[in-house]
Amino acid sequence: MAETTTRPTLPGGFRSAEQGWPELHRIPHPPRRIPLLGDVLGANRATPLQDSLRFARQLGPIYRRKAFNREFVFVWGADLVADLADESRFAKHVGLGVANLRPVAGDGLFTAYNHEPNWQLAHDVLAPGFSREAMAAYHPMMLDVAGRLTDHWDRERAAGRAVDVPGDMTKLTLETISRTGFGHDFGSFERDRPHPFISAMVGTLTYAQRLNSVPFPALLRRAAQRNEADIAYLNRTVDDLVRARRAASGDGDLLDRMLETAHPGTGERLSPENVRRQVITFLVAGHETTSGALSFALYYLARHPEIAARARAEVDRVWGDTAAPGYEQVAKLRYVRRILDESLRLWPTAPAFAREALEDTVLAGRHPMLRGAWTLVLTPMLHRDPAAWGADAERFDPDRFDPKAVRSRPAHTFKPFGTGARACIGRQFALHEATLVLGLLLRRYAFVPDPGYRLRVTERLTLMPDALRLHLERPEVTAGATAAVEEAPSEPRCPVHGSRD
Ligand code: HEM
């Protein structure tokens, strides 16, 4: 981050592409551009990301789109993204959806502008909360929350009911981050309806996404009022949580760090307002994306019983009969981890990140950019670029992540957690939690999809398989599960490319 502090700060607000890309005319755009409206033909307000993926297929590794008077450049070609990962010339750009979250998350870690001093302060204070030692301390709490999920799923299986995968994964991941980070229990598994915190969070994420698709925010007046009520609810919840902690003592979790730890170099502490921003940031960023990642992984496991069987064999071999696998035993589930990576490859649940030029430069030697010009990296397309992933890039194949295959690919081709100084601070947390939970679920259940289920992806800045329900069987009846999948009338198809998986 040091380099950004030596440069004068750029003016805030949206910077349209024609302001920063001198040779914009060389970048293709959709053919049927409508005056004033832009490239809106065929666009669906509910699925902006999947629309962008369709345009990417038609227009190639770099293209632009205009919505009303605002133009954006999208990039997904592996060589272009590798160049954008050069931290000496590019940095995170806080724009579009991320900037729309500023009213709720302010200068919290995720939404802070690079020049805001609270980014470095919070990063340095909170990073030790994601060290190996910290993870090992979270592990028993993660196991405990996973136990509440399996208790619930055991009951559903006994009653012959299918389980609501995204709903239950959201309960699991919210309880995990709130318990490990903040010593708080939302009681999600004891509720029939989502906790109001979840409803308020979904409301603000959806509103932030909708703001991108209207020319004037005033058009969303009613939604804006609801959004304010949602933000007020989130603030109240967090303020109660902090108040309760100040009255009692914690066990050295993230909240204790936020409240008590001084910066090792400057002795500075986070202000009460910034603590509020960080708690909301971590509660939201710490569960929504992991919940989607687990849900997509379960979708693929149900679609590929042979892969599930291989993963289950690994769990049995590595964990044996132990009821409570230890921290170290999770890292040894190499094949389960590959399933997770492969799911995050096809559906990275935070599906884009933005990069801006720190100086006048030329992207990949071909596209001049002025300082402050920015572009959106479309991660699902980067992860499907045949130049990096081969002609069968659409196929689900966890073996793409065996060490030899990983070494054979160029750097910067797999970016589900973003890149550089502003990459995800919770990456190890998410991977440990998700691998542990998949291991526990594989050992206990065989997953059988509804024969008619077709993957549809819901967008609210993050991605989630829509309405995915699975029937649970005992693992030894995997053969039945295989039949159920194979006998499905027609294979589910990717909603973006129409291909299988
Ligand atoms: C599979 C799960 C996850 C995915 C796919 C994911 C993805 C990402 C991505 C792509 C970014 C960079 C965004 C950008 O450049 O604008 C990011 C940043 C961040 N993530 Fe995650 N994340 C996950 C889980 C978590 C968890 C579990 C936590 C917290 C416990 C977390 C906290 C954060 C924070 C605080 C940032 C901002 C970091 C900074 O700018 O300093 N994430 N995440």
Image (cartoon, rainbow, N blue to C red):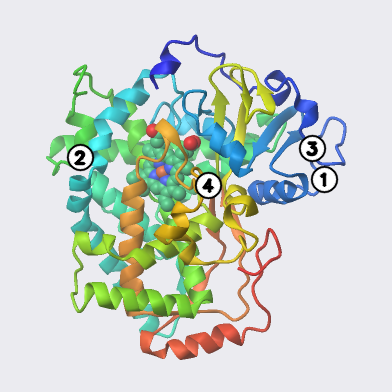
Residue ID at (27%, 28%): 124
Please report the residue visible at 19 percent of the width from the left and 79 percent of the height from the top: 321
For disc 1, the marked residue is 41
**Label 4 CA crowd tier, 10 Å (few <14, some 14–19, many 20+):** many
Question: Real-space Cα distance between discs 3 and 1?
Answer: 12 Å
Q: Quadrant of residue 355?
A: top right
Q: Is residue 404 above or below residue 378?
A: below
Dot placed on the residue nearer the N-terminal end, 4 or 2? 2
Whether 423 is drawn above or below 359: the answer is below
Residue at image mark 4? 413
Evaluate if marks 4 and 1 touch, with contact meaning CB atoms under 8 Å apart.
Answer: no
Which residue has dot 3 on it?
A: 29
Vertical side of 49 occupied by 292: above or below: below
Who is closer to the viewer here, 389 or 124?
A: 389
Question: Mark 2 or mark 1, which is nearer the start of the sequence?
Answer: 1
- The part of the image, by quadrant, that contains residue 243 is top left
Amino acid at pointer 2: Ala
Residue at mark 2: 244
Q: Nearer the viewer, mark 1 or mark 2?
A: 1
Q: Distance between the Cα atoms at labels 4 and 1?
A: 31 Å
